[in-house]
């Protein structure tokens, strides 16, 4: 895997995790 792929995966995973957290804990956002 190239560095660009790793960075893209990290960004995608962090965005998905943020969306899930915002849905589970809406009172914190």
Image: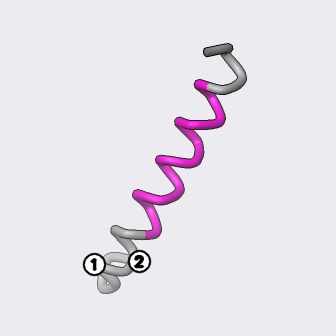
Say the numbered circle drawn on residue 25: 1
Task: Answer with left or right where residue 26 lies relative to residue 12.
Answer: left
* Residue 21 lies in quadrant: bottom left
Rendering coords of residue 3 (x, y %) = 66, 15
Instruction: Find numbered disc 1 in the image and state the secondary structure of the residue it sits on.
Output: loop
Rendering coords of residue 25 (x, y %) = 27, 78
Find the residue positioned furthest to the top.
2
Q: Kindly indicate whether the residue at mark 1 contacts the one at mark 2 (C-beta within 8 angstroms).
A: yes
Mark 2 residue crowding within 10 angstroms, few (<14) / some (14–19) / many (20+): few
- Magenta region, main secondary structure: helix
The structure residue drawn at horizontal position 30% and vertical position 85%, both measured from the top left corner, is 27
Please name whichever residue, 22 or 8, is drawn nearer the observer in this view of the structure. Answer: 8
Rendering coords of residue 29 (x, y %) = 41, 77
Q: Is residue 1 above or below residue 25?
A: above
Q: Which residue matches tag 2? A: 29
Q: Is residue 24 above or below residue 10?
A: below
Q: Which residues are magenta?
A: 6-19
The structure residue drawn at horizontal position 53% and vertical position 36%, both measured from the top left corner, is 10
Q: Is residue 2 above or below residue 7?
A: above
Q: In the image, is residue 14 part of the stretch drawn in magenta?
A: yes
Task: Answer with left or right where residue 16 lies relative to residue 28.
Answer: right
């Amino acid at each position: 895997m190239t560095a660009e792929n790793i960075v893209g995966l990290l960004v995608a995973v962090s965005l998905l995790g943020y969306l899930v957290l915002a849905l589970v804990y809406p009172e914190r956002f």
